[in-house]
Structure formats: C-alpha cells, structure tokens
Amino acid sequence: MTKILAIVRRELIAYFSSPLAYIVLTAFLLMQGYIFSIIVSFLNNPMTQAMTPLRLFFGGTVFFWLFLLFTVPVITMRLLAEERRSGTIEVLLTSPVTEGQVIAGKFLAALLFYIVLWLPTVIYVALLKQHSSIDLRPVAAGYVGVLLVGFLFLAVGTFTSTLTNNQLIAAILAFAALVGLFSIGLIEQLLVSSSWIRDALGYMNLWTHMDDYAKGIIDTRHVVYELSVGLLFLFLAAKSLEVKKWR
Amino acid sequence: MIEVEGLTKVFVDQPVVDDVSFFVPEGQVLGFLGPNGAGKTTAMRMITAFLPPTAGRIVVAGVDLDVDPVGLRRKVGYLPENVPLYPELRVEEYLRFRAAVEEVPRSEVGDRLAEVSDRCMIQDVRRQVVGTLSKGYRQRVALAGALIHKPAVLILDEPTVGLDPNQIIKVRELIIELGRDHTVVLSTHILPEVEQVCERVAIIDRGRIVADGTPDQLRSRMVGNPRLLVELRGADGDGREALLSLPGVTGVEDRGACSYVVEHAPGSDPREAVFRLAVARGWVLSAMTATQASLEDVFVRLTTREEPPAAEGV
C-alpha cells in the first residue's frame, strides 16, 4: 500500500508540474461556468417547468460529454506511455512492485486529478442552495454518477496508455475507445425494432445512466456496469504492461 | 551471490542471449564486456527480473527468479543504461519515492537518504529539480536511487556512457568503492574501464560468453607470454644469442637497429639479467619497456566476425 501511495504521490507531482494540468482545469471551469449560467437563466425564467435544473449540470448537455471525451485522454495519456518512453518503467518494475500495483497507483492518481477537476463546482451548488430551494439528494447522486463514469473512462485511458510509448497515440486511442463506448447508447436509439440487441445496448447507454444519476436514481445495474467494465480495463492494463514492458 | 545457468532469451526466433552461465561470488565486481548489440543489456534485464527469460535459471542472493521474482527484485539495485529519472521531481523527492517503492522502512528513510547522498556526492543538489541537473549528477542521483535499499547486488548497465572524462573518473572511483561491500555486475564496451574497475571479465559476443576470467588471465591466455622491448646499442649481431641465453627468456626477435623483442615466461622477470648482460658486454642499454598485450587485443580477437572464437579462451 505504501508503494501504491508513493506512485500516486509522484504522479500527482507530475500532473501539477506540467502546464497541461492547469490548461485542463481552466478549460473545465470555463465550461462549467457556462453551463451554470444557463442553469441560472433557466431558474430566472418564470416559465421554467418543475424540473431539476442541475440535471443540466450532470450530463444533461452535450458539453458535458464532449468535454469528458476530450479531457480524459489528456489526463491519462501520460500515465504509462511516458514511463515507457523515458525508460523509468524499467526502474519501477525492477523494484519489488507488481504490474498491478503500478496500474493501481497510476489510475488512482488520475482519478484524484479528476476529482480535483470537479471540486470547484461544489461552489455552484452552494450558490444555488443559497438563493433557491434545490434538493441536494439528486445533486449528490449526480456527483456519484460523475465519479462512476469518470472511473470507467479513466480506466479505458489507463489501458490505452500502456499500449504505446507515444503520449499522443495513447490519447488518440483513448479518445477513439471512449467515443466507441459512448456511442453504444446512440446506436440503441437508431435501432427501431425492439430486440434483445436493443435491450442489451440500452443497458450500456451512458447518456441515460448519467441522466438517471442526475435525477437522483442510483440504479445498481448502472453502477455495476461502470465499475465492472472499468475494472476489466484496469486488469487488461496490468496484463498489457506485463507483456509489453520491453520496447 | 549470482548464479546464472543456461540463460537464454529469444526475440522472434532470434536468440539474443544464448545459453549463458556464470557464477559471481559475494563481493566480486564482474564486468560484461562486449560490442554493442551483444546481448549485455538483455542479460541484465533478465537478472533484474524485468524481462522473463525464455529458458534458464537465475538465483540472486538465494532467491530463485522462478519462485519469487518480486523477492529477487528486492535483492537487486539496478541502474539502466539510459539513466531514466523523473525530471519533474526534486532529487530528495526522487530518492524518497525510490525508498518507498523499494520498501525501506519509514524510520530508516532519513538515514538511508543521508548515506546514499553522501556516498554518491549529491548532497549539494538535494533540493534541485532532477530535470535541471547535468548528466554527471543525474548519473549519480540514479545510482543513489539504486543503492537506497542496501541491495546485495548492484547491476549497472554502461554506467559511464555519455560522461566527460572527469565525471568518468569520479563514477569509476565510486564503483570501485561500492565493490568493497556489494556484489557488482557492470556492462561496458570501454576496455580500460574493465581493467580498472573489474576483478573479473566476461566477454560476450552474439549472446554467448566467449571468455571469462580476471583481466590478467584473459590477457595471458589469449596472447601468450609477456614481452620486453630492449634496445642494446653496440650489440650488433650478438644481441639475439646473448639475450636467448638469459634465464626465463623463451624467444627473441631481432628488429634491427639494435632493438629486440624479448619474450619471457610468465612470472619471470629478466630485466635485471638484461641490464647485467649489457654491463658485462659493454653495451649501452638505451631502452627497456615491458609491453603486455592489452585486453583490447583479446577483445578484438574474440569478437571479430571473421575469426572463429579461439578455443583456448573458453
């Protein structure tokens, strides 16, 4: 455990000593600020229906998904690709650390960075709470959803980062994989006739998952999907590291 | 301390390391000498449990690679060839990271840090960011990292590559000193380095060990008897006969202009006799130099492609 924590710590230092982290953080805040302004204008409109405005915040807009699809590859691309390029992976894997521990440490660092990304948005919730009567329970569920979808996406990115020693290629692979994973839900809507395929794809529709979370519904099926597919990719990442550690 | 038996690594049906066996007793400094691409790095990566071997057995400090690869990693400190470091960390942060990963107990980290920084002469850069250090410092920081957990065995892959002559001398001195309380395996293609630093040399070519012994042994095995270069002014035609009659001398070659190459049995030293001979005959001894075949000759002879590997060397 100390070893995993040491890896997490080192990875976080690396994140915050590169300008990329600050660019991502800034862009993220800009986008969230924009969405927040939409929410506020909604609330100020007397015609607003009795919907939970914060649904917009959590996956209700296309911005949310676009941003996740672009940001996650940027967060994860460096993780193992850079270790392999610089050869530090050789130092790491000749110390008494297993491939699984390396992946765990790297992934946790990425997840922590992702959480830091979302942390400032709590201010918006607090602001809204002060000036209107919003229900905090669906907001909490929304954050759970953000965390779970992040878990899944970051696991995919961690895996693609083990495949190459070029950060850019790792990012592109992650982006392609995530778009594929996300568009499963869109394919579902294209299928007209109802069939078992449509049902199966329906279970994997991340858009509806996120929408449910934002409504305050934490559906176990969604949680199981995000966690199990995420863990599968982490397992694949560890295996891929084991096989591909030489260049 | 290190036992390697039948070690083989095949990359896409091309053997890179081919049935290599050797034993390094505790406290010895063994040099892997070989041209680029001979398989030194691959062999070292297997001994450090980074690459899994295709076949063969590796035991380091009593830990068998097949039984406990992570346990074996605990025994080994490794400095890879291109000195990989994390450029964004400070030197101290890097060493603390290495200590945590190498399972140094938290209470000992401070002491270990002080000791390795002292040994590797990096105290003055402890607060500096690794990315800003010169190559020489980076090398020593990486070495300090490899030493942090008091490994029984140190594996150094080309530890002086890319350094300037002063830094090379410093790093060599450091390795000699580390050799006093560690078992060390280092690879190099620099011949004087091996002669200076290593007690034993294994010459590797195309994945095989073609010679193994102390630098002196290799030299004499491969090149025959030691030689003296002698200049006797005034000896003219009689020099050869006279020199041949001296005890220990096995052959004399007349090079003309009063200069002779005297071959003598290993262990004998005919220099005094040559001097007395010159005095007795009234010749002027104007030069006398002991020449020894360098390890370079051995190396070139063993690793040149046209020649079949000399049988007596193995």
Image (tube, coloured by chain):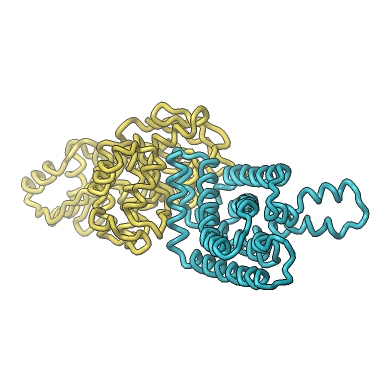
Task: Note whether residue B200 is visible.
Answer: no
Task: Locate residue A22, reporting x and y percent.
Answer: 49, 67
In the rendered structure, the answer to whether residue A166 lies left or right of residue B82 reads right
In the rendered structure, the answer to whether residue A128 lies left or right of residue B262 reads right
Depth check: B93 or B123 in front?
B93
Give chain B's shade.
yellow
Task: Locate residue A82, reporting x and y percent.
Answer: 51, 57
Instruction: Name the residue located 23 percent from the left edge and 48 percent from the top edge.
Output: B118
Task: Locate residue A228, reporting x and y percent.
Answer: 67, 42
Depth check: B297 or A100 in front?
A100
Give chain A's shade.
cyan
Instruction: Name the residue located 28 percent from the left edge and 55 percent from the top edge.
Output: B126
**Which image quadrant for residue B246?**
top left
Residue B218, above or below A70 = above
In the rendered structure, the answer to whether residue B35 lies left or right of residue A231 reads left
Instruction: Name the residue located 69 percent from the left edge and 73 percent from the top edge.
Output: A45
In the rendered structure, the answer to whether residue B240 lies left or right of residue A88 reads left
Task: Locate residue A159, reporting x and y percent.
Answer: 62, 50
